Image (cartoon, grey):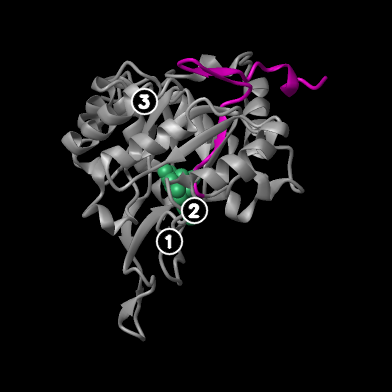
């Protein structure tokens, strides 16, 4: 047994118990099944799957991914196989492989959100449902739903009574004060907040004098957004009583630990898997190694440990 393997990495996010705090972020890890030959999905804290809707969705036309300094812009447009195909063809494979699944889902109305969540609720292998009203790539919504506290509250209110599984609500950073939206979701019964989704952005092809993404704008992710995400996670952890899951630009164990230090109970890793498909497992190992090297026996000791004395 190595010193790092002696570190207790287990975390709880409300009723959800995970063997380590690193989750694969929705939309960046497919349905998990694509990674079968590359890693053991049971070693990931949990697998977040691509945002699911009642009917399959085609997404937006290409080009829909563009690199930018320290990050990338995407305008996938929530393409997915639909909840029925997921339950039939993908979830059983993930469950048999020992994965704990966070099912990300969306709809075009509060009723669609609720119906999709109800369909996923209780399916073997799913440990939590993650409500995504925070994508910047669904123009059909007429904006980002999760930027309006009343609109988000109405969706959570519709979903909550229809599901028994823990309901995580994913927040948008495209707001003035993320705690207002976070509190609105908490008041309607959200069990946890996931923060953050991507920041709306634009990349320009100067020669062509046009946007580089076919959809015009997209969502910025990767290390470029990490300071924004850390700030928002910290603010949310101070503002709400429910757990916060930190997301945004994490590419190393130290990045993950910074989010825990800021108050997150777990983290999600997205863009980093594009250049290192094993990133969630590697990062969990790096978290253990850091803890071991710093005399930390349980990763939970780091959660919310940020010291701000003299830094106000
Ligand atoms: C290509 C791509 C697709 C995404 N699809 C979804 C999605 O379906 N649902 C969702 O809630 N977030 C989605 N996201 C947002 C990520 O889950 C995550 O919140 C964001 O990328 C920030 O984390 P990162 O910097 O580690 O990538 C997507 C991000 C990317 C890059």
Q: Residues within 10 Å of mark 1 (few under 14, many from 20)?
A: some
Mark whose residue sits in front, 2 or 3: 3
User: Residue 221 at what x, y percent from top left?
Assistant: 43, 52
Instruction: Compute the Cα span from label 1 to label 3.
Output: 27 Å
Q: Which mark is residue 80?
A: 2
Position of 40 with respect to 177 (left or right) is right
Callout 2: SS: loop
Q: Is residue 30 above or below residue 183?
A: below
User: Residue 149 at what x, y percent from top left?
Assistant: 19, 35
Q: Is residue 312 above or below residue 173?
A: above
- Which mark is first along the chain, 3 or 2? 2
Q: Residue at x 52, y 44 (%)?
A: 84
Q: Are marks 2 and 1 in contact (CB under 8 Å)?
A: yes
* Extent of the magenta region: 1-27
- Which mark is first along the chain, 3 or 1? 1
**Residue underneath mark 3:** 162
- Of the pair 87 and 75, the residue shown nearer to us: 87
Q: Residue furthest left?
A: 150
Q: Is residue 24 magenta-colored?
A: yes
Instruction: Compute the Cα span from label 2 to label 1.
Output: 8 Å
Residue 145 seen: yes
Q: Residue at x 73, y 45 (%)?
A: 36
Instruction: Compute the Cα span from label 2 to label 3.
Output: 22 Å
């Amino acid at each position: 047994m190595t010193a790092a393997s002696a570190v207790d990495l287990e975390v709880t996010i409300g009723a959800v118990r995970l063997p380590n705090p690193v989750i694969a972020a929705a939309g960046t890890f497919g349905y998990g099944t694509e990674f079968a030959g590359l890693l053991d999905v049971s070693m990931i804290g949990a697998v977040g799957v691509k945002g699911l809707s009642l009917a399959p969705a085609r997404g937006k036309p290409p080009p829909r991914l563009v690199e930018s300094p320290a990050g990338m812009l995407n305008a996938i447009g929530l393409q997915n196989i639909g909840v029925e195909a997921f339950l039939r063809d993908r979830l059983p494979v993930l469950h048999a492989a020992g994965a704990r699944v966070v099912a990300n889902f969306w709809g075009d109305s509060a009723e669609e959100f609720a119906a999709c969540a109800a369909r996923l609720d209780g399916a073997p292998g799913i440990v939590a449902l993650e409500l995504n009203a925070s994508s910047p790539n669904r123009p059909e919504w007429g904006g980002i739903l999760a930027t309006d506290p009343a609109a988000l509250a109405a969706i959570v209110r519709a979903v909550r009574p229809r599901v028994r599984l823990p309901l995580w609500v994913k927040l948008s950073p495209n707001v003035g004060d993320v705690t207002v939206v976070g509190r609105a979701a908490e008041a309607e019964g959200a069990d946890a907040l996931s923060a953050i989704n991507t920041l709306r952005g634009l990349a320009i092809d100067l020669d062509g004098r046009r946007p580089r993404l076919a959809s015009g704008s997209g969502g910025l992710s990767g290390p470029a957004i990490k300071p924004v995400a850390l700030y928002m996670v910290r603010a949310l952890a101070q503002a709400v009583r429910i757990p916060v899951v930190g997301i945004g630009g994490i590419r190393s164990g130290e990045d993950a630990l910074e989010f825990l230090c800021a108050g997150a109970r777990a983290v999600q890793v997205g863009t980093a898997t594009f250049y290192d498909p094993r990133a969630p497992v590697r990062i969990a190992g790096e978290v253990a190694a850091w803890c071991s090297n710093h005399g930390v026996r349980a990763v939970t000791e780091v959660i919310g440990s940020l010291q701000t004395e003299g830094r106000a």
